[in-house]
Amino acid sequence: MIELKNVSRHFGNTIAVDGVNLTIETGEVCVLVGSSGCGKSTTLRMINRLLPYSAGEILVDGEDITTMNPEQLRLNMGYVIQGTGLFPHWTVARNIAMVPTLLNWPRERINARVDELMTLLDLDPSAHANKYPQQLSGGQAQRVGVARALAADPNILLMDEPFGALDAITRENLQLEMLRIQKQVRKTTVFVTHDIDEALKLATRIAVMDQGRIIQHDTPENILRHPASDFVENLIGKQDRGLKLMSLRPVRDLMANHTEPRQSEPGEHVLREEDSVRLALSVMLWQDLRQVAVFNAQEQETGVITRERIIQEGV
Amino acid sequence: MRVWLPATLLASLLLALSAGMPVLEPLFNWVQPGKQQVIYERESFLFLLQNHLMLVVVSAAVGTLVAVAGGIFVTRPFGRDFLPLVGQVASIGQTFPPVAVLALAVPVLGFGEAPILLALVLYGLLPILRNTLAGLEGIDPSVREAALGMGMSPVLVLVRVELPLAGRVILAGIRTSVTINIATAAIGSTIGARTLGDPVIAGLVNGNTAYVLQGAILIGLLALTTDSLFEALERSWDRRLQSVGV
């Protein structure tokens, strides 16, 4: 658990962060979102003491971080940044092994861990372990960045616009990957982005920041339904709210279940239980259908979702 | 291994000529007819070569230490205030001719090896300092940020990340510095240091072109040898990274 209590950072006469109160529960993904210069990155970098704060206190698992050795503190916090920050003179494997090496893990354990992480992040160890970061694509490099952050199994993950420099397709892939990994490892995560869609997709709770303050801290659904101010309303895109709410909701919520799963031939592009209602609607509009069959992970048809139901209850 | 071949060949030629210059007596008789003595014999060439090298090596070692330490100091958070000043000095110092440094050093340190050592250290320091700064400042800031943010101590960041990344540029600075200093050290002969400049000066004073040639050839060969040595060093440095195609 990370707690920020009345944290401020002054910078001469300018105030970068102004009395921020924020509690991030264990296992939660908290996304700090706001326009550039709103203090979101500054807030993140104060949590691992890359930046000092002028007032207030930050507690990690109840302990004041200023009483801890900064290196010890950081070794327990994975850190992923936009430019990846991979060491260009080290191989991928050595980059990932960085923190375990600092912690003096035995060689075999490090090697096993590097293999495990590369597999987790969908990088083939035999193909990529001995490459240098310059030889990777942007998406691969950022996967390595995430693997490096997870290497020593830290309790906390800090991510500063990690997917900001990637193209839309790669970014979306990595977002999905992150959701999948988060399900497996359940790290307490603080994620900074300026992209509200990314925030809505990844967050369990979103903290909207403006001019160094937190304007609203709530679940994605509540942010969409009850924006606290005009600023938040503009950020989430007033008119687009309906569709955004739909994309938070899984098909599972609105489908009519069959009494028992049926075996049938799922096509290439099938709708799954965990897909969003928005996707279901899109499929129906495009293929001009009244209803669509829904499949589970075992390729069984478990129910159908209808257009009427989405229109009535989708939001 | 092939990268080291030119350096080895040049070094053998240099040593052979230093030891066996008298073999070439007929050639120098032809160059400088009418002199009784055409081979410089006041001091053995090997001794002069050794002394010359000693001056260059000592000044390069001291210069490298001071310049790299200085470069590191002004790029740390506590030394940042000095960065603009040091950066300017490093650039302006380059425009100062070495002879001028020598002329200024003699009144302070007298004649002999001391003033030339001082001049060599001061003059050789600048290219190394400039390259150390360029190398350290040229590192992608996100690399340093990630290293610190993942829990490396500042000293580890310097030793494991910054210096290896800046090393190639620093090495290039040392190469420039040493090459310049090999030439500059020869000027030391004018103020009483024993260097390969001795035969050149003696030849100029006595109007003996053969002496001048012998000194100049050896100095030139020494400079070429050292330069190709650094070339080989840089190549093998690159190759370590390039074996994987950076």
Image (cartoon, coloured by chain):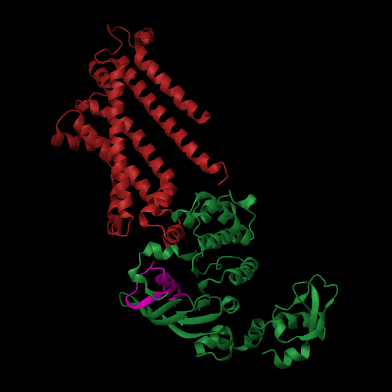
Chain colours: A green, B red
B93 or B65: nearer the viewer: B65
Q: Position of residue B124 (x, y in %)?
A: 30, 39
Q: Does residue A239 lie above or below A119 as drawn?
A: below
Q: Does residue A288 lie above or below A73 as drawn?
A: below
A227 or A79: nearer the viewer: A79
Which residue sits furthest right?
A264
Magenta segment: does it hold B9?
A: no
Q: Does residue A59 lie above or below A238 as drawn?
A: above
Which residue sits furthest bottom?
A312
Q: Position of residue B161 (x, y in %)?
A: 43, 51
Q: Quadrant of residue A310?
A: bottom right
B198 or B48: nearer the viewer: B48
A292 or B109: nearer the viewer: A292
Is residue A21 shown to the viewer in this render?
yes
Q: Position of residue B180 (x, y in %)?
A: 34, 34
**Residue drawn where x is 69% and y is 89% of the image:** A314
**Residue drawn where x is 53% and y is 56% of the image:** A96
In the picture, measured across the screen, residue B199 lies left or right of residue A116, that is: left
Q: Position of residue A313 (x, y in %)?
A: 70, 92
Is residue A83 shown to the viewer in this render?
no
Magenta segment: does it hold A53?
A: yes
**Residue drawn where x is 64% and y is 60% of the image:** A122
Question: In the rendered structure, which segment of residues is drawn in magenta?
Answer: A36-60
